[in-house]
Image (cartoon, grey):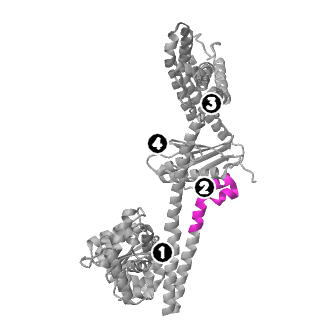
């Protein structure tokens, strides 16, 4: 990861905030500011113009979804800002709210993933580069919640695996590596998924993102 | 099982405190007696109506009066039930009795109400009037030496209506009579109040055999309140786990991840990170301990209610005097409830009242646990304002307990709790 990536951290727990900053700085990343509330982090984003903001979901005053709302607001002000939301538990409805404005440069991970530093840095890099990083937990929730969806029913188990990894934000090569298949096979699966989800190549949006959003949206309607 | 010592600031017999308690009890009894007059006088009226209706029913007029008389009887009985419940003798409403004469004649509720009416209109009224007359006489006779010189000669001197004072020694003797009245008030009025309330408690209460349906409705409501209290408690625990211990443990994993990377780069720097990880893990343990203590304080188990409350008093930000009179051990859930009520009340006092002192009194006798928290703060506590009181009320309702909050502007604030001790 390029060392000159500028990061702002918002986390209301001071120990965890310092722990995160320590870890990222030790990796040579530039943590330009840390904040304990949504308002503080929005101000810090305005002032320091970071490349990426790492936000905790539950922050004062109400300890519910301040981080999600701060993420949406930050993206409204600066659409190019990469945002990685960390949470102690994942809630698929938060994910869909977060991704409603587009999935590029967005991440939503469980807090403890940070401890697996290599994977966390990969996910962070992907988000900074305009990609997506969705926690496997969210994707798993998605599949449990949408089991009655008829279009989902059409997918084969293998195609579901591929969609799950796509939702996590992995590219075709990475998906192939994880599933121990060739890239060609992954291509075939993805084409088949798009077909079954009725996403035509004429769609202007990234069909990969659209496939994920489709399910997030569907899951939100059901919940 | 441990004994239950009387916890008090000073172990010696405390004469002023005893006097204060007795005069408080007498004051409460007098208020009850006088309150009883408020239903006893209408009771005389209703009794007269009943007699008129009964006599005139021979010629038919009474039959027309009957529904009116019955409605008045039921209304008055309802008023007495609410009065007694307010005074701390819980009287459950029976099923609404019929107002049609033919049904009413056979209705046990109506018959019991009639028996109560006769007693309350006679003995109850007499006791109530005594409750007014006694303090008036006491004041009059006690103050006699202050004013007797200004009264015309041969005016009746004592409140008993005989004996006229002509000299100072005689006037002072009248004061002695006043002191006797005070002694009678302190000694007898609590008993008089009980005697006055007894017919109502016995005859107006729902018959335990016939009135299960209302009791079931009430139990359903309190059960719902219990579940609400339970849900609120779960939310509190979830919040404590999530924002406290879980974050600490996440910190541990983050720091361990950082330490592993550091070991790969330069092992010498890893020690400091591991040190921080360890201290975060220790904090997680401390927080878990405090959460489990908040679920059921082990101190209750170890030292009983008296010991646990003394601990709370010692930690209170406002100087707290605590008095526990609990020869009977209560059910664990009841003791835990009492503990939390006191903890919550003391927090409220410290936060909102601006009080300089607070007193907690707990009394567990006769199957009831009674708890009073009084502070000398600015008063004006509003139940709708904070959720603290609402939380206490819910928690109490789950145990069939009641709460009374008196907090006039300017203070003092008194919180009174009464719940079955569950034994």
- On the image, the x and y values in percent for residue B74 come to 53, 25
Tell me if mark 4 has few (under 14), some (14-19) or many (20+) residues whose alpha carbon lies within 10 angstroms of its own: few
Quadrant of the image occupied by residue B298 = bottom right
Residue at 54%, 22% (x, y): give it: B73
Q: Is residue B414 left or right of residue A171?
A: right
- Badge 4 is on which residue? B410
The magenta segment is B287-313
- On the image, the x and y values in percent for residue B173 come to 67, 20
The Cα atoms of the two marked residues, 1 and 3, are separated by 61 Å
Q: Is residue B98 left or right of residue A130?
A: right
- Counting residues from the start of the chain, the first of labels 3 and 4 encountered is 3
The nearer-to-camera label among 2 and 4 is 2
- Badge 2 is on which residue? B312
Of all residues, the one furthest to the top in this rendering is B59
Look at the picture and state if B6 lies above or below A191: above
- Counting residues from the start of the chain, the first of labels 2 and 3 encountered is 3
Q: Which mark is residue A221?
A: none
The Cα atoms of the two marked residues, 2 and 1, are separated by 30 Å
Q: Which chain is disc 2 placed on?
A: B
The Cα atoms of the two marked residues, 2 and 3, are separated by 36 Å
Q: Which chain is disc 1 placed on?
A: A
Q: Which chain is disc 4 placed on?
A: B
The secondary structure type at the circle numbered 2 is helix
Q: Which mark is residue B201?
A: 3
């Amino acid at each position: 990861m390029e060392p000159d990536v500028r990061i702002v951290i918002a986390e209301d727990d001071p120990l965890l905030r310092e722990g995160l900053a320590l870890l990222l700085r030790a990796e040579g990343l530039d943590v330009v500011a840390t904040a304990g509330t949504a308002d503080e982090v929005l101000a810090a984003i305005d002032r320091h113009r970071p490349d990426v903001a790492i936000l905790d979901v539950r922050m004062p005053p109400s300890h519910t979804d301040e981080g999600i709302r701060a993420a949406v607001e930050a993206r409204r002000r600066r659409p190019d800002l990469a945002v990685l939301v960390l949470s102690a538990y994942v809630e698929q409805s938060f994910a869909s709210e977060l991704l409603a404005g587009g999935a590029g440069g967005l991440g939503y991970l469980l807090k403890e993933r940070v401890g697996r530093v290599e994977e966390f840095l990969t996910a962070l890099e992907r988000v900074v580069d305009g990609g997506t990083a969705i926690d496997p937990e969210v994707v798993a929730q998605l599949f449990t919640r949408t089991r009655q969806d008829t279009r989902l029913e059409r997918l084969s188990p293998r195609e579901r695996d591929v969609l799950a990894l796509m939702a996590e934000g992995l590219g075709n090569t990475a998906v192939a590596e994880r599933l121990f298949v060739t890239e060609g096979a992954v291509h075939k699966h993805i084409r088949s998924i798009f077909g079954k989800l009725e996403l035509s190549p004429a769609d202007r949006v990234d069909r990969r993102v659209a496939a994920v959003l489709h399910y997030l949206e569907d899951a939100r309607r059901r919940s | 099982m441990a004994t239950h010592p009387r916890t008090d600031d000073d172990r010696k017999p405390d004469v002023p405190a005893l006097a204060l308690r007795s005069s408080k009890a007498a004051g409460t009894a007098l208020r009850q007696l006088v309150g009883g007059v408020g239903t006893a006088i209408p009771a005389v009226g209703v009794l007269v109506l009943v007699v008129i209706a009964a006599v005139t029913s021979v010629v038919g007029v009474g039959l027309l009066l009957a529904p009116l008389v019955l409605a008045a009887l039921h209304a008055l009985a309802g008023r007495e039930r609410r009065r007694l419940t307010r005074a701390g003798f819980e009287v459950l409403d029976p099923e609404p009795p019929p107002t049609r004469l033919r049904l009413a004649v056979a209705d046990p509720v109506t018959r019991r109400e009639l028996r109560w009416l006769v007693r309350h209109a006679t003995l109850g009224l007499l006791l109530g009037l005594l409750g007014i007359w006694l303090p008036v006489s006491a004041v009059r006779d006690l103050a006699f030496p202050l004013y007797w010189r200004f009264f015309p000669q041969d005016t009746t001197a004592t409140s008993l209506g005989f004996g006229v004072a002509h000299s100072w020694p005689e006037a002072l003797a009248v004061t002695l009579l006043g002191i006797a009245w005070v002694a009678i008030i302190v000694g007898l009025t609590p008993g008089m109040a009980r005697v006055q309330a007894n017919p109502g408690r016995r005859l107006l209460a729902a018959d335990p055999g016939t009135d299960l349906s209302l009791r079931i409705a009430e139990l359903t409501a309190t059960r719902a309140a219990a579940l609400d209290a339970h849900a609120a408690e779960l939310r509190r625990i979830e919040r404590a786990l999530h924002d406290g211990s879980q974050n600490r443990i996440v910190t541990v994993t983050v720091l361990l991840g950082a330490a592993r990377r550091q070991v790969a780069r330069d092992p010498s720097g890893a020690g400091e990170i591991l040190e921080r990880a360890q201290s975060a893990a220790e904090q997680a343990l401390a927080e878990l301990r405090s959460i489990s203590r908040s679920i059921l304080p082990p101190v209750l188990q170890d030292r009983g209610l008296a010991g646990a409350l003394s601990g709370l008093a010692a930690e209170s930000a406002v100087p707290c005097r605590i008095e526990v009179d609990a020869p009977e051990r209560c059910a664990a859930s009841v003791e835990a409830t009492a503990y939390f009520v006191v903890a919550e009340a003391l927090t409220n006092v410290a936060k909102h009242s601006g009080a300089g002192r607070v007193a907690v009194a707990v009394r567990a006798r006769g199957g009831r646990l009674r708890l009073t928290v009084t502070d000398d703060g600015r008063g004006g506590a509003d139940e709708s304002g904070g959720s603290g009181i609402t939380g206490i009320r819910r928690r109490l309702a789950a145990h069939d307990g009641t709460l009374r909050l008196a907090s006039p502007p300017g203070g003092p604030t008194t919180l009174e709790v009464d719940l079955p001790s569950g034994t």
